[in-house]
Amino acid sequence: MKENITIRSNDNGSCIMLRSAKMKDSEKLRRWKNKNSKYFFHKNIIKKAQQIKWMKDYFSDKNNFMFIIKYKNTEIGCIGFRKRSDGADIYNVILAHNGLARKGLMTEALNLLFGFIKIRFKNIGKVYVKVLKSNKVAVLWYKKNCFKKTGNFKDAHFMVWQGCTCAKRS
Ligand SMILES: CC(C)(COP(=O)(O)OP(=O)(O)OC[C@H]1O[C@@H](n2cnc3c(N)ncnc32)[C@H](O)[C@@H]1OP(=O)(O)O)[C@@H](O)C(=O)NCCC(=O)NCCS
């Protein structure tokens, strides 16, 4: 059975927490992904049945971790990673509430995820992401969060986390 994980900060001032995605999140995840499709490699609109298939595969894959991000009890987005042989592949990072952009909330969510990865998989290798070159905001966001470009594809950067949490909430 898929593990049910909750990740909270030790910092009492933090209002961000992560909880494992569940089947009931299927439509929400589909809506968020479709709305943000221009930022991702998969451009086609995801249909309901495709999403359900994805969810089923997800629940049978112990190396796939998808979290719903909660801010003061409101679900504001999602963030995930897939454990690979060479490390952790960050994916499906979405802030789904426009009004909450640039408040450091996604950075907090990312740092919670880093904390979980480091504790759970001590020798994980690298933490990385493949991000579209056209997604300038995301590239800036990863840079600010200590990811460095280490590889180059035709349409994407390969960025590796340098192992620090240099981004601070403003
Ligand atoms: C990328 C994303 C997760 C950032 O979320 P956020 O909560 O606004 O980001 P944070 O508040 O944690 O970090 C803010 C930093 O991100 C970068 N950033 C975020 N929005 C920006 C914008 N509109 N213009 C320029 N830089 C921006 C900057 O470095 C900013 O720091 P600054 O405000 O000090 O300049 C969000 O914009 C998003 O969900 N984008 C659509 C989906 C996506 O692209 N996902 C990544 C796919 S690989």
Image (tube, grey):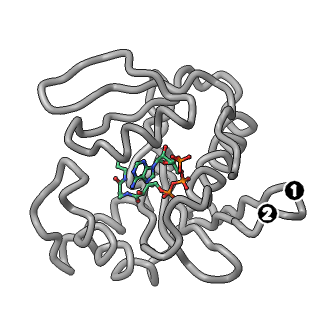
What is the crowding at mark 1: few (fewer than 14 residues within 10 Å), some, or many (at least 20)?
A: few
Q: What residue type is labelled 2?
A: Ser
Secondary structure, mark 2, is: loop
Q: Which residue lies furthest to the top in this view?
A: 150
Left or right, residue 79 beside residue 14: left
Which quadrant is the N terminus positioned in? Answer: bottom right
Q: Which amino acid does label 1 sit on?
A: Asp
Left or right, residue 28 beside residue 163: left
Work out whether 46 lies above or below 168.
below
> Residue at (67%, 62%) from the top-left corner?
5
**Total tally of numbered discs in the picture:** 2
What is the crowding at mark 2: few (fewer than 14 residues within 10 Å), some, or many (at least 20)?
A: few
**Percent x, y for residue 143?**
48, 32
State if disc 2 and disc 1 touch (CB < 8 Å): yes
Residue indicated by mark 1: 11
Q: Distance between the residues labelled 1 and 2?
A: 6 Å
> Residue at (56%, 36%) from the top-left corner?
145
Return the mark for residue 14: 2
> Residue at (63%, 48%) from the top-left corner?
113
Secondary structure, mark 1, is: loop
Q: Which residue lies furthest to the front in this view?
A: 170
**Percent x, y for residue 62?**
51, 49
> Residue at (23%, 51%) from the top-left corner?
40
Work out whether 144 lies above or below 59.
above
Left or right, residue 70 beside residue 58: right
Mark 2 close to ligand 1, CB under 8 Å: no
Work out whether 73 lies above or below 127.
below
Left or right, residue 55 beside residue 51: right
**Percent x, y for residue 28?**
38, 80
**Percent x, y for residue 36?**
27, 65
- Report the front residue among 123 and 132: 132
Work out whether 103 lies above or below 161.
below
